[in-house]
Amino acid sequence: MTDVMTQTRTITYREAMREAMREAMQQDDRVFLMGEDVGRYGGCYAVSKGLLEEFGPERVRDTPLSEAAFVGAGIGAALGGMRPIVEVMTVNFSLLALDQIVNNAALYLHMSGGQFNVPLVIRMATGAGRQVGAQHSHSLEVWYAHIPGIKVVTPATVEDARWMLPTALSDPDPVIIFEHSGLYNSEGELPEPGGPVDIETSRVRRHGSDVSLVTYGGSLPKALAAADELAADGISAEVLDLRVLRPLDTEAILTSIGSTHRLVVVDEGWKTAGISAEIAALVAERAVWDLDAPIRRVCTAEVPIPYARHMEEAALPQVPAIVAAAREIVG
Amino acid sequence: MLRIRRFEERCAQLYQTEKIRGFLHLYIGEEAVAVGVMEALEPDDAVVATYREHGHALARGVDPGKVMAEMYGKMEGCSRGRGGSMHLFDAGTRFYGGNAIVGGGIPLAVGLALADRLQGRHRVTAVFFGEGAVAEGEFHESMNLAALWHLPVLFCCENNLYAMGTALERSESQTRVTLKAASYEMPAWEVDGMDVVAVEEAARMAAGSVRTGGGPHFLEFRTYRFRAHSMFDPELYRPKEEVEEWKERDPIDLLKERLESEAILTDEEWTGMEALVADEVEAAVAFAEAGTWEPVEDLTRFVYSEVGG
Amino acid sequence: MIDFVLPSLGADMDQAKLNSWLVKPGDTVHKGQIIAEVETDKAVLEVECWDEGVVEELVLSPGPTRLPVGTVLAHIRLLEGAEPPPKQKEPEQALAPPPIPPPAPHAAPTPPIRHLAHEIGVDLARVSGTGPDGEITREDVRLAATALLGREQRVKASPFARRLADELGVDLADVHAGGPEGLVTAKDVQALGAGRHAATPPHTAVEPPEPEGKAATMRRAIARSMAHSKREIPHYYLASHIDLDRALRWLTAQNEERPITERILPAAMLLKATALALRETPDLNGHWVDGGFTPSEAVHLGVAISLREGGLVAPAIHDADRLDLAEMMTSLTDLVKRARSWRLRSSEMSDPTITVTNLGERGVETAFPVIIPPQVAIVGFGRIVDMPVAIEGQAAVHPVVHATLAGDHRVTDGHRGGLFLDALDRLLQEPESL
């Protein structure tokens, strides 16, 4: 690599994911895309727009509304030598395919004593914020992060949206990529030339010394905004983007707490038995002597997501709540 | 068929002496289906089966010692002791399990067939399931998808009339399973599952058509299991007389009688076969008995692949 | 003759009752024949025979007793020619659950226990005993006392604040709680502890790295040791200037004749001089053990070495008084290298009889170090600086090092300490004797 200043390019999260898929399909014949409305419709969130025209119907397959069958077929195709990308429209519909994911994809390597690995990538939109009602607003990443045998990633930046996919595709085991629907329109600077990024580590998006805001996915922009507000008040917040929920980058979390001594977890899932609980437990187990204040978790209220805008906003984690939590424990 | 029969009988005995644990589902009475269909498949084809899969594994060519060792839970078992009776896997014979969720393997078979189509291969994926699976959503989704995309799947429904304890007429509004398949625009045949020759003929025709681009086919095998659903089943749901009636059409007896009547099989040959099979079964048991237990230190292996991606 | 046993007929079946026999002694039985009926909680099950033979004896009769899987129900004599089943390992005997033992009577607390409890204020009625027969042991009583103490004296402080308080030797009870809900936080402890912190060598164990990282482990150990030292050991301090003009001239001349890699640093001289001076004041060289001083025959000089991740170790150069300067230099270099790559030996960590610190590296002129228990003294050397001195009435500028001694007042006093520093000075004026 020559020693020139890194160039960047402005791109949306959606475009970044599209580019990633296109490049993957161009470079490897084994890669194909399968899911509801990924072809003719161009993808529910327009992520796969143009791919059908470029690659044809054998490699960009519109499926019937049969999540169990097409996710299972993705598993079978992976077993049969392909590298499928299965797009489940949202995590809400993935519940229909839970049996295939939990009982087949996650278990085949283990049950076969190591004979059959499943190199499958599943992409799903997740999250709330558009008044689409309770059934369309879940953040169930934690359910999948609970299962040994699969890997769960949550790209929140355009760089991760662009470059996590090739790594996931070359992983011999099932990888689920969660894309917060609120991020698709977000724009960011993509460093050029880029390259595949790891799917094992977290990133400190903003260094700080007074409190660690640990978060992932759609909550990252809110955590960063909260950090800005806190800075104006003289509170230096560190923002840690988890990037991967399974395997969790425990070292990064512990290092951050070792430096700031205070933890606020921001998580759009519900608080009870959520990812935030896992992080709090981890810190209590391994960094308790670094904690200078109680742990705080800013999560969705224990309610199904309502339709009316003001109610939905009240239910979801917002910047003022993150700022308040940080202020409370920094003192 | 005889090999499967004697193997399964031995498994029953071993379960009762606690060598085999967990759930044990025996194939006794249904041997003709697995044997007949496997005869019609090529070595390169794929097989997806259910938790009642010992017969399929043996007929497919998985080593009996490895099967028995797996049921003992030994490391030398075909799944390293990790799976047990319901999760026999063998990469060498493209035997993709051993699945304990009713209907759970059917979408996998559709995917394996999809991979063959995308890679331009002329292979068949045969998937076995009971008539109980026909009630599951995953069955219908898979049938539709396979037919819609014209995939090389051979659907083999082993209709033994009972899904554990529930008879077919108590769970299906339409008990003619082939009609369901036909509703997906798929060729579907009913076959006498106790007649191994009939099974093989039907399977050959169907597999041949699948292999040469005829799309998915559906075979319904009318068969019966002579023993209970699993080891601990008092069989309160079916009358003893019914079992006895079906036993009169024991597939092994049927074939034996036919071969004897056509003077193809002699008494000595039969005795010889029994002896051969008995030796094989005992060798399998001995192999399992001599096997080793996987070290506990290896507990966390095989959750993720060990070779870098 | 073979045993016909009650088989396992299901994953969750452990026992069954024998309901009836379908055969009697003398009957011929065949493989696959149902010969008995048993009953579990769930159902009545038929049991088949796996052999060809004749029933010899029905060992058990039908009845309501729950029999464990594996119980011998009958004996069957195998027919001639019929092979006995292959030899298998003993089937696991399902043991009948052991009878519940009658509850043991509680042994009354013995008089010594009652006395101890009274002394430390523990109510024996609330103590559960862990000894045989529920007897209350001394340990039980002490644990109960600790729990009591903990509850009464517990200060609400964050875990980090507690750790800092330990490290800085601050008593949490003295700290004003500035955090939310009356919590003592790190900031509060630091406010009180500022100024008490001195850069001194720790007493650490060289363990393989723990998950938190070696540096963090080290800091914890430093904290514990420093706090202990300051609490337990009454320190006195002495200081003096030592003129190193002669010593350094001599050293320069020596080094000119040596290849660069074998040049000797002033530090080696200081260490050797220290070791020799200790021979004259042996009550600075040894350990405080069990309430008394144990002098050491050998002089194992602990050398404080800073680590890049932060923290210090002070491993020993063994028999420092017997090494010549070249050997001292080599030992020192080797020790520093191994310390920084965590390859010290446990004997090096446990053996120092005295420690020397702050060999001018830090740019500090004077050091007031903390004694590392169980040692009883510590020597500090500051930076070598040029200072004006008076030589026979004339002013001159000579290189001078500021040496300090901290001593354990329980073992030595200022007089003894002064003798040591005198000896040190004297030895450094005769470098050729080092």
Image (cartoon, coloured by chain):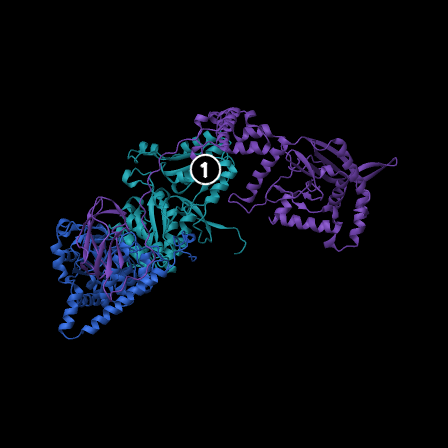
Chain colours: A cyan, B blue, C purple
Image side of residue B37 versus residue C132, left or right: left
Residue depicted at 32% across the width and 50% down the height? C93
User: Is residue A42 visible to the viewer in this orientation of the structure?
Assistant: no
Q: Is residue A301 above or below residue A176?
A: above
Q: Residue most toward the bottom? A: B263
Give the residue at x 62% y 40%: C203
The residue indicated by pointer 1 is A284
Residue C225 drawn at (x, y percent) = 60, 36
Where residue C13 sits: x, y (%)?
26, 48
* Res C245 quadrant in image: top right
Q: Secondary structure at mark 1?
A: helix
Residue B70 is at least partly visible in this image? yes
> Which quadrant would the N terminus of chain C be assigned to in this image?
bottom left
Q: Nearer the viewer, residue A81 or C200?
A: C200
Tell whether A61 sits left or right of C259: left
Q: Is residue B230 above or below residue B187?
A: above
Tell me which residue sits at (77%, 54%) in the image.
C258
Q: Residues within 10 Å of mark 1 (few under 14, many from 20)?
A: some
- Callout 1: chain: A
Residue B33 in which image quadrant: bottom left
- List x then y, in percent, for residue C388: 81, 36
Residue C224 rendering spot, x and y as whole percentages: 58, 36
Is residue A258 positioned above or below C33 on the image?
above
- Give the residue type at disc 1: Ala
Q: How many marks?
A: 1
Which residue is at the front of the view, C421 or B5? B5
